[in-house]
């Protein structure tokens, strides 16, 4: 007697669920991980999704039993679906998201024939429907065991990588990783707009077998691209403790692309008048200022351990999302070196791709100079910051907190002080073609040399410095129309929000 088609269907559906793979799920949990379906459920807050290719199995029917494949290779190692992310904050249209979640419990998340076809299908739909994409990239790279595919030679006629990268600038693309991510999986992770990884991530363009096969030595998987390495070299934008936190961060990051929020609160702004030290040469923590300015819990810093003299991130003011660029005087005195210039360039490009305005908080003596700086490729990295600013299609708002000196300050405002839709300074702002101390040493070198070393020369130096400071004060810069206004720090939030709404 033929099996009831609905019973057969229900059994096939159950074979794709965690309940049918109890041993694999327990193994995953024992190692501190979550299943792909648990991550999917968390992303969409338990709401239904439209899944694509749910009943696919590995292309290995010629060597394995079909029923065995249904359970052991469910979905061919990847869940592809369209569902609603952040539906509690945004309407159905804004919340609609393409979701690609590699399943490491299936053949170590390797990329097989149908695995690629499923991803290709979803990436095509994301492009057609203009949907953001969240992709979980864990996996061991290409899979050599798909014996059913007889028309493939080297297995390189694969559109996935091109389709993923071709979405750059068309839709937001967020990658999340936990565990081992090698070869093709790492290529997908690295090509995302925003890259989130757990502390237990190991990400490399080849896994141990490929490295050893290439005659490059024998390594453990945990030797290759650990997260503590990739946080310092800029590969990882945000590090999470585990998959739960990584998923939460992915939802927060995606929300900046989905639009303004209506509910927000913020700290009292009155303390901003005393936020900077009275001594203009003293360093301070700009994060304390930024977090007070922004809506509460809205600041998401990017790459905090890379290019540390510049802070980048995403934030909101009065619910309006934007990209953040800020100098950090605690590192190199706020001078922009090659790493931080590269970091700022990437922030400009991310803002352009995600159609976010940029708010730049400026306090820099300029670009880092000297033989050591040049050896890092400074002319290329620093000039790229100008190029990224010049090609940015989104508006910039510039807030000068203190120093706005030289080419570095210009690069912080898109390449010129005339580029921002509004450029305002706190009363503590100071401006000039280079740092004041350097300008005195350079411009008055002979005059100072005529004085004997000691108190007399130091006093004359300080007098010249005071003159330059008066000439470069924010109110003087505003009087020459180099900036648009000087503002009370208390009004910074309202200044920024009105400028962003006017864009």
Image (cartoon, rainbow, N blue to C red):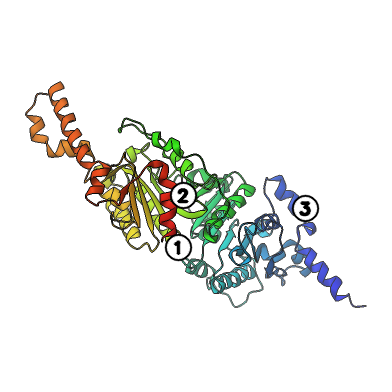
Tell me the tag on residue 353.
1
Residue, disc 2? 313
Q: Quadrant of the C terminus?
A: bottom left
Q: Badge 3 local density, few (<14 within 10 Å), some, or many (20+)?
A: few
Q: Is residue 474 visible?
A: yes
Q: Quadrant of residue 57?
A: bottom right
N-terminal-most mark, 2 or 1: 2
Mark 3–mark 2 distance (CA, rounded to whole Å)? 41 Å
N-terminal-most mark, 3 or 2: 3
Task: From this view, report whether residue 19 is shown above or below residue 230.
Answer: below
In screen coordinates, is 431 left or right of 254? Answer: left
Q: Quadrant of the N terminus?
A: bottom right
Q: Is residue 454 visible?
A: no
Residue, disc 3? 23
- Out of 482 and 133, give the one closest to the viewer: 482
Residue name at image x 49 percent, y 50 percent: 315
Q: Secondary structure at mark 1?
A: helix
């Amino acid at each position: 007697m033929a099996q009831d088609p609905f019973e057969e269907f229900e059994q096939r559906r159950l074979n794709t669920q965690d309940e049918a793979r109890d041993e694999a799920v327990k193994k995953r949990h024992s190692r501190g991980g979550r299943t792909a379906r648990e991550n999917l459920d968390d992303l969409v807050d338990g709401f239904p999704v439209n899944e694509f290719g749910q009943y696919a199995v590995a292309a290995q029917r010629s060597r394995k039993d079909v029923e065995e494949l249904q359970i052991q290779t469910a979905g061919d190692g990847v869940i592809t679906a369209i569902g609603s992310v952040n539906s509690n904050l945004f309407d159905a249209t804004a919340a609609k998201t393409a979701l690609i979640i590699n399943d490491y419990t299936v053949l170590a998340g390797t990329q097989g024939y149908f695995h690629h076809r499923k991803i290709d299908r979803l990436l095509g739909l994301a492009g057609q429907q203009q949907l953001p994409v969240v992709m979980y990239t864990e996996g061991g790279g290409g899979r050599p065991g798909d014996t059913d595919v007889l028309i493939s030679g080297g297995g390189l006629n694969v559109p996935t990588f091109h389709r993923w990268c071709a979405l750059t600038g068309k839709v937001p693309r967020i990658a999340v990783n936990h565990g081992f991510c090698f070869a093709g999986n790492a290529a997908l992770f690295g090509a995302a707009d925003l890259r989130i990884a757990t502390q237990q991530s190991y990400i490399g363009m080849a896994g141990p077998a490929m490295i050893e096969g290439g005659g490059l030595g024998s390594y453990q998987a945990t030797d290759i691209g650990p997260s503590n390495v990739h946080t310092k070299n800029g590969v990882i934008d945000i590090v999470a403790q585990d998959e739960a936190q990584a998923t939460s961060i992915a939802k927060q990051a995606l929300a900046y692309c989905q639009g303004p929020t209506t509910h927000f609160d913020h700290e009292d702004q009155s303390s901003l008048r005393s936020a900077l030290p009275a001594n203009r040469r003293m360093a301070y923590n700009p994060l304390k200022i930024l977090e007070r300015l922004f809506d509460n819990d809205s600041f998401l810093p990017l790459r905090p351990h890379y290019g540390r003299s510049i802070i980048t991130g995403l934030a909101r003011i009065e619910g309006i999302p934007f990209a953040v660029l800020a100098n950090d005087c605690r590192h190199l005195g706020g001078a922009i070196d090659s790493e931080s210039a590269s970091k700022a360039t990437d922030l400009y490009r991310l803002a352009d791709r995600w159609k976010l305005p940029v708010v730049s908080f400026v306090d820099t003596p300029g670009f880092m100079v000297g033989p050591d700086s040049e050896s890092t490729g400074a002319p290329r990295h620093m000039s790229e910051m100008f190029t990224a600013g010049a090609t940015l299609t989104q508006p910039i708002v510039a807030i000068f907190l203190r120093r706005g000196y030289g080419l570095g300050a210009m690069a912080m405002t898109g390449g010129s002080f005339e580029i921002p839709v509004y450029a305002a300074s706190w009363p503590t702002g100071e401006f000039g073609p280079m740092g004041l101390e350097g300008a005195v040493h350079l411009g008055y070198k002979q005059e100072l040399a005529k004085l004997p070393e000691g108190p007399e020369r130091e006093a004359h130096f300080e007098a010249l410095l005071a003159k330059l400071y008066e000439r470069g004060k924010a109110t003087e810069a505003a009087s020459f129309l180099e900036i648009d206004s000087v503002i009370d720090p208390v009004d910074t939030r309202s200044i920024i929000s009105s400028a962003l709404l006017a864009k």
